[in-house]
Amino acid sequence: MKKIVFFIMLFVLVPCAVSADFHTKEGYDIPEENYQKLKNLYSDVSIYMMPYEKYTNLMSSSINFDNVQEVSKYIYTICDNFTGECEDTEISEEEYKNGLVYLPAPMATDVYSTAAKELTLRLTTPSNNLVYFTLSNFWSPYHLPQVRSFDVIGVRIGNFHVVNGSQTGSQTYQTNGEYKSVWYAPNGTNISNQSTGFGISMNIVNDNITYLENSIEGSLQIDAVPAVIYGSYQHAVVDVDLATSKSYTITSGGLGYVFKFSSSKIESYYDKMHGTYLNITSL
């Protein structure tokens, strides 16, 4: 009897690992297993802001969340506020996250502006000849944009085609401690759907923000292999209107290998940040 009592007491004293659900802004909870799947495609903030309908659609889809390619670039940009000319420098993840970049002397802050951004492209492995992608641009909290106008984010695809209706976007930001989102529909006024990909113009919010993420996503049908996707984010360094921001074709000769604007003058309105890419080489 004493041995039995000792065993029971020992069992009670051993801590058990308990998985916690992820609580979203809409008030629903995401089980730990599903949260870990979503993290392969989305940031924590994006998951926190995810509408319930989108969450249920994702979970009921055939997306392969467990095998996701990912590539990230960290870019520091210095722009001349008078000429609009910008210079990009690729920096390390540590420099980006800790704000370890600065405006070199003798450059004056009233003449030059800086930005630090992370551009991350994620792509799932094929399932029934379909893949899902997310492209996200994260602004460093140490170098948030000074100019708030129509930035563009988009993808160029080769041997893919976009599953119509799946292409969406969001601008997520934090102000006064609260996260908010602007959502962009597949056929809204801000999107440009082209045979070679699509782009969305996002008017950067003027609020006093401490976090800013711009993202697009969608399903792609594989037409042949190898298939490739290029992602680009271009920040407007001067004030532009929506029509001007959409005056581009999606082509290999464009900014970030995506955006070819209708004139060199319009191209000069953007910071010419480097793009990134991923591919599918076999089915």
Image (cartoon, helix red, strand yellow):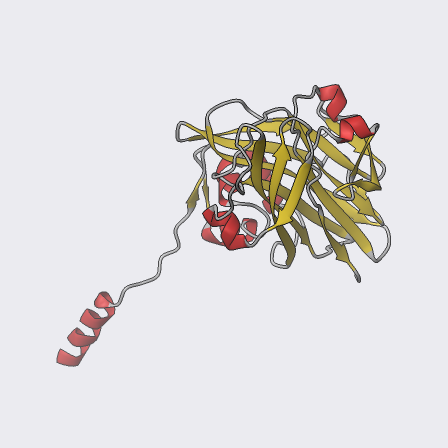
As drawn, is 1 to the left or to the right of 187? Answer: left
204 shown above or below 119: above
Q: Position of residue 192 (x, y in %)?
A: 77, 29
Specify whether 274 is left or right of 137: right
Residue at figure coordinates x 43%, y 34% from the top left: 27
Image quarter in which the N terminus is found:
bottom left
- From where the camera sits, is residue 106 visible? yes
Give the number of marks. Answer: 0
Rendering coords of residue 152 (x, y %): 69, 32
- Vertical relation: 86 (above or below) 204: below
Q: Is residue 24 left or right of residue 5?
A: right
Quarter of the image where the C terminus is located: bottom right
- In this view, the residue farthest toward the front is 106
Of all residues, the one furthest to the left in this rendering is: 2
Q: Residue 275 or 128: which is nearer the viewer?
A: 275
Based on the displayed image, in which of its 4 quarters is residue 111 positioned? top right
Please give the name of the residue rendered at 79% of the width and 43% of the height, measured from the top-left corner: 156
Asked if 164 appears above or below 69 in the picture, the reply is above
Residue 32, position as x, y percentages in the image? 46, 52
Q: Position of residue 208 (x, y in %)?
A: 46, 25
Q: Nearer the viewer, residue 165 or 4?
A: 165
Q: Residue at 77% x, 35% y: name it.
A: 198
The answer to which image quadrant residue 151 occupies is top right
Q: Is residue 36 visible?
A: no
